[in-house]
Amino acid sequence: MRYQSFDPSNCGFPQPRVPVLPPLGRRALAWRGPTAARALTTAPNARFYTRGRYAMTEAYRLCGVGPDAPLLAPAYHCRTMLDPAIRLGADVLLYPVTQALKPDLAGLAACLAASAKRPAALLVTHYFGFAQALDELLAFCRESGLALIEDCAHCLFLPGQSAQIGLQGRYCVSSPYKFFAIEDGGVLWANQQAPLPTQPLQAQGMVQEIKGLARAAQRAWSQTPLDDTAAYGAAASVDTAGNEGEDRLHDSETPSAYYDVSAEHAQALAVSRLLLGHTDTERLSRLRRSHYRAWLQAVSGLPNCQPLYADLPQDTVPYMFPLRIDHPEKHFYQLKRLGVPVWRWDDMAVSSCAPAMDFRTHLLHLPCHQALTPNQMRWMTGTVAAVMTGQTVGGSS
């Protein structure tokens, strides 16, 4: 496949001043008795891997994805969504998405019709925690003989939740470490009595457990003190000039460096499973929604940017705040050099889908997790406002 990738190694970006994911600590954990999340580690129709990408490998394999049966995947993706199919020797067919990141059903049908091989499965992604409407897609899969796999890596997937996210496809794959203050975790959840892998997962051992705890402690202590008002006082007060990164096209027929074959059958750390099952999920949901609304208020009326989703449905627990910027060649670099924790999917397979290729560099993923403090939220929203309105200090403002 052909990929377009952004290489930031020449940029000298500083470490983010705010954690992208919730670090271990009181604000992220809020320990309580066993919660609904515990079922992810104990339910008979679940397997708890060290990462969602390895759970996805098994979902693809169990649906028949392989050398003679391609995978249909969305054109807007991270590499770890494609790696498992490539690991299985399968072709990946990229179907188009709309500006709202919904599957383009007409384009999907055209993609299927153009394939010389009959695909085995279709992957649908609930981006940023916002549920896709699946009725038409489910009907399409039934008519086409496709297994539907729900990618819930951006969702707070909890069995028994009121929303139907993750419960309509043959399999659901989620990544709890993106929501909980844990070091690893990827869930394979089977619906409709679909089979699970017969090979048992391998415990990582005491050495890895200790290393996991050490990493969690290091992440927690490496952040700027959460109550340091002075550290988050100025919105944007450093020089934002510097070298630009390299955007390049390249071909690859193997999984990316993110995929570790030796970890395919590794179980998540015991400490991750313990913390997951005792985290206050109601508080987690409430704070994430509150922070998302704060972002919406902060960017309302700002020039040069637009939120991807301007409404927050009642049952939605957001993973990140997606913000499309008009001028990434300027504002992405400024935000990164100011230490704003910006993620984006800029390492993608090339496709003819215009929204996907636009979002590769224009769509920013900004944190809204439960461990953020009021000072951190004020600093991030203030810095984004300063950058979008041209108030930053430095040569590129």
Image (tube, rainbow, N blue to C red):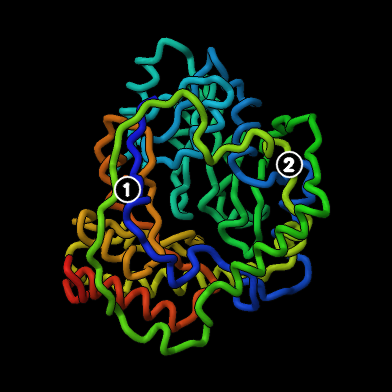
- Which residue is denoted by mark 1 in the rendering? 100
Q: In front: 323, or 244?
A: 244
Residue at image position (25%, 61%) is 242
Disc number at residue 266?
Answer: 2
**Image x and y of residue 194, in percent:** 70, 31
| Left or right: 36 in relation to 88 | right
Amino acid type, callout 1: Ala
Q: In this view, does 245 lie above or below 170?
A: below
Q: Position of residue 156 (x, y in %)?
A: 57, 57
Check disc 2 and give the amino acid type: Ala
First along the sequence among labels 2 and 1 = 1
The residue positioned 39% from the left and 65% from the top of the image is 14
Q: Residue 104's x, y, as percent?
A: 33, 35
Q: Residue at x 28, y 56 (%)?
A: 324
Mark 2 Cα-neighbour bin, 10 Å: few <14, some 14–19, many ≥20: some
In this image, 55 relative to 360: left or right?
right
Q: Distance between the residues labelled 2 and 1?
A: 35 Å
Dot 1 crowding, Cα within 10 Å, few <14, some 14–19, many 20+: few
The picture quadrant where one finds residue 57 is top right
In the image, residue 6 above or below residue 237: above
